[in-house]
Image (tube, helix red, strand yellow):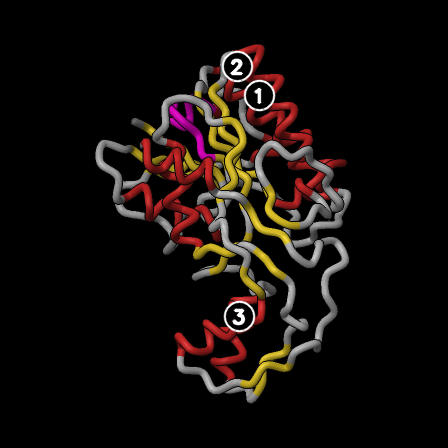
Amino acid sequence: MRVAVTGASGFIGRHVLRALAGCRDVEVVAVSRQAPGPWMQPGVRHVSIDLAAAPSDAFEMLGNPDVLIHLAWSGLPNYQSRHHFETHLSEQYRFLEKLVASGLQRLVCAGTCFEYGMQSGELVESLPTDPGNAYGFAKDALRRELEFLAVDTGLQLTWARLFYMYGEGQAEGALYSQFLAARARGDAEFRMSGGEQLRDYLPVEEVARHLSALACITSGCSIVNVCSGRPTSVRSLVEGWLEAQGASMKLALGYFPYPKYEPMAFWGSNAKLQKLMESN
């Protein structure tokens, strides 16, 4: 089986490459705008493509893959930028539609928990979406477009709705990266929000394993929450990092305000994900 991965040089993409490297009988093609770097895995073929100006033979350049894990998305972490729907949404759809027209039959596409909007509590895949930021709106719109495309073409679509994650290679502004930087500097305290918000977190390595497993399922799975299924307070998450790394920093709680584009308490149902993983 040949699996192509867009956004391969990104935070999630490089971990997906590692996860796929451990799969038997899987040939991997890494797709990115960047030249190959330390994130590349041995035996992986690299293809350089700009989604905004993809050539007409993009599918052939990727080696006619059996499945595409689509992670590429620009403009992050600015979730409020209109760029997501004014510019990038159409670029994303044109790229994917072109691949499907050329023969792509299976697609695992990364979505976001921001598609649920300001809904609180446990979030199940059947809930109606109501995104409250530009990024979530654009992702939700792309999902709807791809669902119409799947009906017309027979595309086997899996929409992997990602929740929160942390790990090696995350952007500098992410909570985990800020924590590691503060520890490396020897800071006496770590500045953060009040930490009482409840979220759903997974290590990025686990997210990558789930995405790789979803790519190996031959039929489309529709929407799948990729999450832990457990509500965790941000404060307890950071306290766990402190304990695991033996750090002596104190938490400066309440230094930053809570984000206005997120409810205080939400997490995903992972019942569907667990069922798929058990049957795969």
Left-right relation of 238 to 114? left
> Could you tell me which residue is drawn at 40 percent across and 42 percent down?
210
Q: Give the number of the mark in front: 3 or 2.
A: 3
Q: CA distance from mark 3 to mark 2?
A: 47 Å
Q: Horizontal and vertical percent for residue 261? A: 74, 53
Mark sitting on residue 101: 2
* Residue at image location 67% in from the left, 41% down from the top: 116
127 or 165: which is nearer to us? 127
Query: Could you say where residue 109 lies in the image, as x and y percent from the top left?
Result: 52, 33
Q: Are marks 1 and 3 in contact (CB under 8 Å)?
A: no
Q: Is residue 251 above or below residue 8?
A: below
Q: Amino acid at mark 3?
A: Ser
Q: Is residue 130 magenta?
A: no
The label shown at residue 9 is none
- The span picked out in magenta is 59-69
Question: From this viewpoint, which residue is outermost toward the top?
Answer: 152
Give the distance between the C-alpha atoms of the residues marked 2 and 1, in whole angstroms.
6 Å
Query: Which quadrant: the C terminus?
Result: top left
The tag earlier along the polypeptide, 1 or 3, is 1
Question: In the figure, is residue 53 to the left or right of 201?
Answer: right
Residue neighbourhood size for the residue with mark 1, other residues' Cα within 10 Å, grouped as few (<14), some (14–19), many (≥20): some
Q: Based on the displayed image, in which of its 4 quarters is residue 214 positioned? A: top left
Amino acid beneath label 2? Ala
Is residue 3 depicted above or below 39 in this figure? above
Q: Which disc, if any, is residue 236?
A: 3
Residues at circles 2 and 1 in contact by the CB criterion of under 8 Å: yes
